[in-house]
Structure formats: structure tokens, C-alpha cells
Image (cartoon, rainbow, N blue to C red):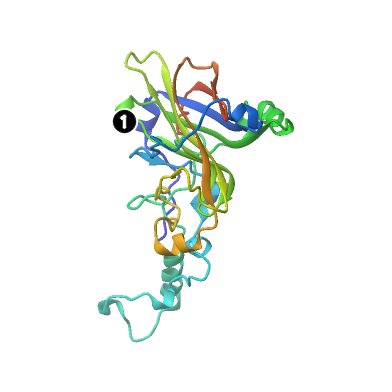
Amino acid sequence: MFCLLLTTPWAAAQETWFQIEVSVFSNEVPADRNEEVWTAAGLALDYPPRLRRLDTLLSRLLIPAFTEPAGVEPLAAENLSAPESLLTPEPDPVAERLDSIRAAGPFPPRPGEPYAFIDFARDAFVQLPMTDSDFRQTNSALERNPRYRLLFHGLWRQPMPMRDAATALFVSGGERYDEHYELEGSLRFHYNNGRDRIVADADLWLSEFSVTPDTEQDWRLPELPVLPGLPAAAVGTPEAAQMRRYFPATIYHLAQQREMRSTEFHYLDHPALGVIVTVTPYEVPPFPE
């Protein structure tokens, strides 16, 4: 039977958890962006090996029919082959219906895991509702100011690991150009060696695009990562190259680390980008008896 689990391992509650909120915005003033000279020489952008997205309620409910590329027919349930030993002389309509549901999804975000609804109080790396946000006024002020543009807002909870065990969060935002977005990169949070500070590790890049390639500089964006729960982007394929309409014209790179105390408001400055961060202790509630 199709099983929905509503529990989270109790061991997770024994770790030290924090609630993290991040807003990333762009500086829309050209004079500010050009305070530094930006060149493609030596620019090597990449994603860390341990990477994931924030889970959302919508992503848990997506089925392949909603994520198939245009023009690709999803595999119909009646076309699924079954072992000959399972075939019966007379079809069972109830069994056929269950097989159809299993073939359609939704599926767990990572292979091998049971399917589970989101537990906002106990699940890590889940995008929380805006009612839990402390940045509502800050984000509203950014959106009202023509000098800035809000590109990404993340609000989630997670256990805090040491650096070697930390998982980075994939970040994207702004307008989309082909398969890429204006803002891409990763954020990672972990303890410092003394476990008395939390380190915010930001590796983000903001791209400007053009309909013609730059003949003077070789601007290159890394291929988008293939992450669980979402369809793989057709990056690096001949078909994608032929369909490309936009090319990076300038890339502004922000790579900063900041040691933070919890509950403090931190700002990472950059000529083209700004990142505001808060990290607050969070106690995972016990399950009801």
C-alpha cells in the first residue's frame, strides 16, 4: 500500500538546531557595480559536492507529469511492463488503479526513502512560511527601493554540523535566461573549530546576459547541479547549445565567510550583491505522546 510517514527520527531532536534566515539582493546602480574591475580571467565557479535545495510543500507533491519537458510524453501506467508471474487471466480493476497511482507519484525527494509529508517543526532544510520570518519589513523595504532588487529569500531550520559534514544549499533567483538564473551559487553554515561561532560561507554569483557572446572575454557558468526531487536540466547537451538564446556578459562573484554569533544581524557587502543573515537557536519540539 502507498504509505505516508508523518514522523521524523527522534535522534534529530538531540542535535543543536538553528533557524536560519537569508535574503540576497542586487545593487541596481551601475556605478556601484563597477567600483571593481570584473574579468573572466581566473574566474572558476563551481558547486560543492554536498549540495541540496530547500524542500517546499509543492516540491513534495509534484508528480512527473508536471515536471516533464514540453513535448515529452510521460510513461503511461498501462505501458509499464510487469513480470509475467504477476499477470492474471482477468484484470483486477482495483490493482490496476493502485498500480496507476504508484506509477504517477508523488515520489520521495531522495531514492530509497519513504514518502513523507513535510513536518515544519521537525524537518531540516524546509522552506518555512513567511509568518515565521523576521525579515518581512526588511524585504519590503528592499522591494520598495529602486536601487535594490530582492533575488532570494530563504528561511529554514537545520542541525549545525562541523565544516567537513556541512551540506550546502543551492541558491537561485532573479530572472531566468535559458536554463540559468541571474543569481546562482550556494550557501553553507557550520560551526567553527572552537564550536563557539557559526560560519556563514557564501559562494554566489550574479550574471548579466546578452543575446550575443562576448568575443573579448570567455565568461563561463558552471552546469546546474542535478538535485533530488527535481528534473535534471538539459545542460551541456547539443540540443541545449543549439537552443541557447542568451550568453553571460558579466559575472559578479561574491565569495565570503563570516563568523557569527547567534541572534545577531549580519550583512555581507559587495559592489553588486548584498546578503543579510540571522541565525537563531531552535529547540526541536518532542513528539506528542
Return the residue nearer the eye: 215 or 61: 215
**Secondary element at image label 1:** helix
The quadrant of the picture occupied by the N terminus is bottom left
Reading the image, the residue beneath label 1 is: 165
- Residue found at the far left of this picture: 85
80 shown above or below 58 = below
Provide residue 51's location: percent of width, then percent of height: 38, 40
117 shown above or below 139 = below
Q: Is residue 288 visible?
A: no
228 shown above or below 129 = below
Return the residue nearer the eye: 167 or 275: 275
Residue at image location 36% in from the left, 37% down from the top: 48
Q: Is residue 251 left or right of residue 29?
A: left
Quadrant of residue 161 in the image? Answer: top left
Provide residue 8's location: percent of width, then percent of height: 41, 39
180 shown above or below 155 = below
Number of on-image labels: 1
Q: Is residue 127 left or right of residue 160?
A: right
The quadrant of the picture occupied by the C terminus is top left
Quadrant of residue 186 in the image? Answer: top left
Provide residue 180's location: percent of width, then percent of height: 51, 49
Query: Label 1 sits on what residue type?
Result: Ala
Provide residue 176's location: percent of width, then percent of height: 57, 49
Q: Is residue 194 visible?
A: yes
- Residue found at the far front of this picture: 216
Counting other residues with Cα less than 10 Å from the Cα at mark 1, is it few (<14), some (14-19), or many (20 or more)?
Answer: few
